[in-house]
Amino acid sequence: MPSKRRLRWAALPLGVVAAVALAGCTTAEQHGYLPGFVEGGPATTNQAERVSSLWVNSWIVLLAVGIITWGLMAWAAIAYRRRKGQTGLPVQMRYNMPIEVFYTIVPLILVVGMFFFTARDQAEIEAQWPDPDVEITAIAKQWAWDFQYEGEEEDNADAVWTMGIQAQPDAEGDIDQSQLPTLVLPVDQKVTIHLQSRDVIHSFWIIDFLYKKDMYIGKDNTWSFIPTREGEYDGKCAELCGEYHSMMLFKVKVVSQAEYDDYLETLRDKGNTGDINDAYDRLSNLPGSTAPAHTEEGEE
């Protein structure tokens, strides 16, 4: 048998080759081909690396388990195949306690381990800022989006908003990007988005941000994160919500703080001020109630 020293020297070049191969991976390969990453640039949010790491490491573990399992299956099929001249059934084994303990304990360790890392990362992602720099309410409706940028006054009179429509085709039949609802976010700022629905269950998904959250009538969700790379990104509803679900699209623009402030000022100049959260609810009844909801003056 080779000595331990020889084994170590044999393993050294293998380690070097593996390190070089990993170092040569592109950004896309290192992050499991997930969106949200570019060569030489930061991820889209402060959470994208965490999501990517969970995704890639889970696949590594699962592939390792698969390779071992497939290898054992192939070995058993070859080692215990019927030889020429053999007849009847092979020797039957009813119980093998070490093997049964092994295939009970190992899957349990894998499940507990994956649950631990998933729960840990989810807890970090779901943590809310105690004092965010920006608060926005995203309101889902069949089949479009409204975005309200919250103000600082107690009655929210200084809030500004935009109201969107569902995706519209252009003359060539493609989606007219200029008419999509647009959510504007300042880069490198703590953002909290309050998620509301006016009618049915929707799901708020910014694809390159690698996260989505459902939106329920009568139960608000919240998502806190930091956009870390300027650019334009696609968003959509990820929950089947009716006939025109596929047209429930929106755009996200991550801009500098100065551009963000200028954008809010343009909304004020248009008169898009005040709190729209309750004024445009579609349902006539609150969940669990048969009494009509409060109707704003002038609302049908």
Image (cartoon, grey):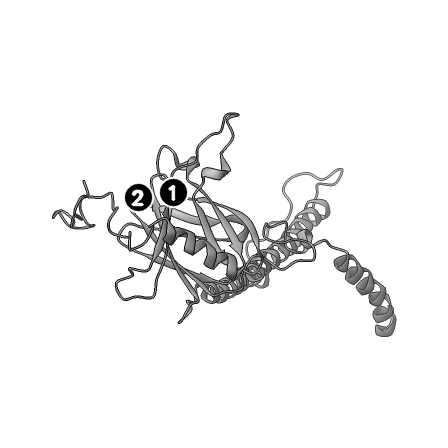
Residue 79 placement, left or right of 252: right
User: Does residue 180 lie above or below 95 as drawn?
Assistant: above
Given the image, on which type of amino acid does mark 2 rest?
Answer: Val
Residue 70 placement, left or right of 185: right
Q: Nearer the viewer, mark 1 or mark 2?
A: 1
Furthest residue toward left? 291
The quadrant where residue 1 appears = bottom right
The quadrant where residue 242 appears = top left
x, y percent for residue 103 = 56, 59
Q: Secondary structure at mark 2?
A: loop
**In terms of depth relative to the viewer, which is nearer, 42 or 188?**
188
Quadrant housing the C terminus: top left
x, y percent for residue 235 = 48, 46
- The residues bearing labels 1 and 2 have C-alpha atoms spaced at a distance of 17 Å
Residue marked by disc 2 = 200
**In terms of depth relative to the viewer, which is nearer, 208 or 69?**
208
Residue 233 seen in the figure:
yes
Residue marked by disc 1 = 164
Given the image, on which type of amino acid does mark 1 rest?
Answer: Gly
Q: Earlier in the sequence, mark 1 or mark 2?
A: 1
x, y percent for residue 278 = 24, 51
Residue 103 seen in the figure:
no
User: Does residue 120 lie above or below 220 as drawn?
Assistant: below
